[in-house]
Amino acid sequence: MLPIQLFRQNKELVLEGLKKRNFKETELVDQIIAIDEKRRQIQVENDNLAASINAASKNIGQLMAQGKKDEAETLKAEVASHKEQTKELAAKLAEMEQEQYDLIIRLPNIPHSSVPFGKSAEDNEVVRQAGTRPDLSAQKLPHWELTEKYNLINFELGTKLTGSGFPVYIGQGAKLQRALISYFLNYNIDAGYTEYYPPYMVNEDSARGTGQLPDKEGQMYHAVADNFYLIPTAEVPVTNVYRDEIVKESDLPIKMTAYTPCFRREAGSYGKDVRGLNRLHQFDKVEIVQLIQPEKSYEALEGMVSHVEKLLQSLELEYRILRLCGGDMGFTSALTFDFEVYSAAQERWLEVSSTSNFENFQTNRLKARYKDANGKTHLLHSLNGSSLALPRIVACLLENHQTPEGIKIPKALQPYFGADMIKSSPLIG
């Protein structure tokens, strides 16, 4: 959520940021400012009344001591009238603050100055590209055929049990999932991240705190009876650990990592772009989150990008890093770098990670703060990244490392998988 001070002090910056995002409802900015000006006037009026009540109350005591009972009674009547007025003004203030809040949370974050203009993924900027593209034979298979050939994933069984977008991992496929999760977590822990194992459902305050509500309300699975939301990413519960908390500056940076399944209703159901593991309603992901001082957050973002990049290198996959344009960024982000891995069998790039700096957009909602050495309180900056999302990583590992003998397992993953190759396994069932 954008701080109200930003609207007061730099309206043009807000409007320019919304323009870069191709955000249409720019009239909200003037509405927010108008409400704020009126709210501040009422606040001044209320403060003046409170001061008058305090002064009159002191005078009443003095008048009573002097035996001027009639004058004291007149002041008492004035005080009673002022108190009724302050109640009315307090109710107006609460109503206006809620109205202002309801408008502000509809606005996305302001992009960092380095974010390029653009309307869609086609306008994203390639920062760098690395890795070797495998030279596969003409008999190369996409991952949905490889998973059937080696009996790793049963998509039809998932549809039977639940519906489209809920695959069932079997045998070596399940083992590969477990190996990747363990490897990713250990890699993050070795880099100083503390592991969390959070709930898979959150309450409305948590979903609103990280910006999923109201922006992505229709994309989240909602347990209506309890008003809980299935998490779309571990970022939601993990970042909310510090909701309404004030930490000491000496405790920063706070670095957290977590594995969770993720649930998203927006997954499509037709075409090659959503076939197999390309887009799911339920998938596994390991997340990294940081909370840090504002002046250090972009240095932290660079470190997180490097961290994810080295992880991809260890998986022996060709990848590229994109700086997202204003029109393709997430609602809460100020700057996002996407990682894509090349799928040699599908001959296309697949997104496997987004690493973002949210600045104080989330922490303003969360009221996540720190106290500096002078005792002054400041909002933290929050960052997060996928390290990594599994489905498309699995797709590219299977496709890019396929051979006539089987599917090669990258060296870094072999201790977790317990073998250097996926070979044919008997069908189950």
Image (tube, helix red, strand yellow):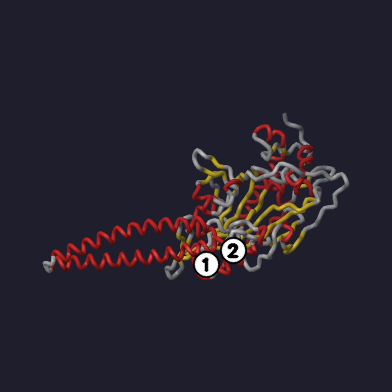
Q: Nearer the viewer, residue 115 or 378?
A: 115
Q: Residue at x 78, y 52 (%)?
A: 348
The residue that disc 2 covers is: 110
Residues tagged 1 and 2 counted as in contact (Cβ below 8 A): yes
Residue 198, horizontal then vertical, whole percent: 54, 47
Q: Residue furthest right?
A: 138
| x and y, in percent, of residue 4 in the image | 49, 64
Is residue 411 rendered to the left or right of residue 49?
right
Q: Residue at x 72, y 29 (%)?
A: 429
Q: Earlier in the sequence, mark 1 or mark 2?
A: 1
User: Which mark is on residue 331?
Assistant: none
Q: Residue furthest top?
A: 429
> Can see residue 252?
no
Q: Provide residue 146's location: percent of width, then percent of height.
A: 78, 41
Q: Residue furthest left?
A: 67
Mark 1 residue crowding within 10 angstroms, few (<14) / some (14–19) / many (20+)? few
**Residue 118: image x %, image y %?**
70, 62
Q: Amino acid at mark 1?
A: Leu
Residue lying at 28% horizontally and 67% vertically, measured from the top left: 52
Q: Is residue 302 above or below residue 410?
A: below
Query: Closest to the observer: 15 or 388?
Result: 15
Residue 321 lies in quadrant: bottom right
Q: Residues within 10 Å of mark 2 (few under 14, many from 20)?
A: many
As measured in the structure, the alpha-carbon distance from the residue carrying label 1 to the one carrying label 2 is 10 Å
Please name the residue that numbered disc 1 is placed on: 6
The image quadrant of residue 229 is top right
Q: In the figure, is residue 173 to the left or right of 215?
A: right
Query: Mark 1: which secondary structure?
Result: helix
Whether residue 65 can be seen here: yes
